[in-house]
Image (cartoon, helix red, strand yellow):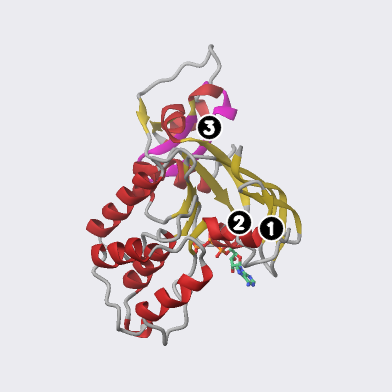
């Protein structure tokens, strides 16, 4: 079963649309949602939680259509970090704990207190005086304190220092030790995703470019560096070139090894890629001669 399943989802804003989005998040996995600023990551996560209404298509979360009445019950099992300003700024963590105890049936004060201590958060300070990082940590503490089965985290590690990011990635890994537990997270810090995700879903201008297993992805793509004047003379299947980056002295081509033909001859080394390479080069696209 999928933890989340988006089928043919469409959303139109004035100058932007999410188009025909099909995305499935396998149960028990950590999936990283990547894409440049404005690619539609937050919109997608908000649509999953019904915080933004889609125009058409269907979204199932933990087996339930998110427009059905039962979705309210399913929300109990979802831990979310969506917006920096998620709770009113005049509240304290102490007050939030009292409030959420009434909202979540499975709320666990001891777990919340454990994370409050781990994240060194104050109970009696109003949120207005929290830093962005503190607000993120508080939301994460909440997300982990009501026995969620699914975590949906939008930029949960941004604004946090490397030590705390590492700590959060450890918590996420620990969370998915239970095979029913799933995490969908977006981040600008691609190295964080590269470290912890099983799958990468890449959104580009509202369209899903791919959703692939991370290890397979890093194995499949390579970078071929050639001199600018050599590009047009290359004798490889053009369809295998998925992106390119041009500087004064070299052109870096993102090559899909699986799409190379057996007759292709490659001059030069195929270098290993990082997730960031794949994202940047694919977003830039390919200049066809
Ligand atoms: N309520 C809204 N009304 C109009 N346009 C919107 C609204 N919400 C988002 N958009 C537009 O949708 C596009 C996608 O925004 P979204 O926040 O989903 O991107 P993102 O990938 O999360 O970006 P970032 O990485 O910068 O957070 C942007 O062009 C944004 O301006």
Q: For the residue with label 3, is its CB less than 8 Å from the closest atom of ligand 1?
A: no
Dot 2 alpha-carbon crowd within 10 angstroms: few under 14, some 14 to 19, many 20 or more = some
Mark sitting earlier along the chain (1/3): 1
What are the residue bounds of the magenta stretch?
235-255
Tell me whether circle 2 and circle 1 mark residues in contact (CB < 8 Å): yes
Residue 58, percent across and down?
Answer: 73, 51
| Residue lying furthest bottom | 90
Give SS at disc 3: strand
Report the residue at 51% width, 66% height from top.
104
Q: For the residue with label 2, is its CB less than 8 Å from the closest atom of ligand 1?
A: no
Give me the disc on residue 241: 3
Q: CA distance from mark 2 to mark 1?
A: 7 Å
Q: Pick whichever, 195 or 204, lies toward us.
A: 195
Give me the disc on residue 94: none
Q: Quadrant of residue 157?
A: bottom left
Q: Is residue 186 above or below residue 211?
A: below
Give me the disc on residue 74: 2
Queried whether the magenta region covers residue 207, the answer comes back as no
Q: Pick whichever, 254 or 61, lies toward us.
A: 61
Left or right: residue 18 compared with residue 94: right
Q: Which residue is mark 1?
A: 70
Residue 269, percent across and down?
Answer: 35, 24
Tell me whether circle 1 and circle 3 mark residues in contact (CB < 8 Å): no
Left or right: residue 110 compared with residue 224: left
Give SS at disc 2: helix
């Amino acid at each position: 079963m999928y933890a989340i399943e988006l089928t043919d989802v469409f959303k139109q804003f004035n100058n932007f649309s999410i188009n025909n989005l099909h995305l499935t998040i396998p149960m028990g996995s950590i999936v990283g949602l990547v894409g440049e600023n404005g690619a539609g990551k937050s919109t997608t996560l908000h649509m999953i939680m019904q915080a933004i209404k889609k125009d058409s298509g269907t979204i199932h979360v933990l087996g339930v259509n998110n427009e059905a009445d039962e979705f309210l019950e399913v929300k109990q099992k979802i831990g979310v970090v969506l917006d920096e300003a998620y709770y009113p700024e005049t509240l304290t963590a102490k007050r939030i704990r009292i409030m959420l105890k009434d909202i979540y049936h499975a709320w666990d004060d001891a777990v919340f207190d454990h994370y409050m201590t781990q994240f060194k958060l104050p109970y009696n300070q109003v949120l207005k005086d929290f830093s962005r990082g503190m607000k993120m940590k508080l939301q994460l503490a909440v997300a982990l304190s009501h026995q969620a089965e699914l975590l949906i985290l939008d930029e949960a590690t941004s604004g946090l220092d490397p030590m705390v990011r590492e700590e959060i990635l450890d918590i996420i890994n620990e969370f998915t030790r239970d095979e029913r537990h799933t995490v969908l997270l977006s981040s600008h810090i691609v190295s964080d995703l590269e470290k912890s995700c099983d799958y990468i879903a890449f959104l580009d201008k509202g369209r899903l470019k791919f959703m692939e297993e991370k290890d397979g992805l890093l194995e499949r793509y390579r970078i071929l560096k050639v001199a600018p004047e050599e590009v047009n003379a290359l004798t490889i299947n053009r369809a295998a070139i998925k992106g390119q980056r041009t500087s004064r002295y070299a052109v870096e081509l993102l090559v899909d090894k699986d799409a190379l033909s057996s007759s292709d001859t490659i001059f030069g080394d195929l270098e290993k890629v990082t997730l960031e390479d794949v994202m940047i080069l694919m977003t830039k696209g390919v200049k066809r001669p």
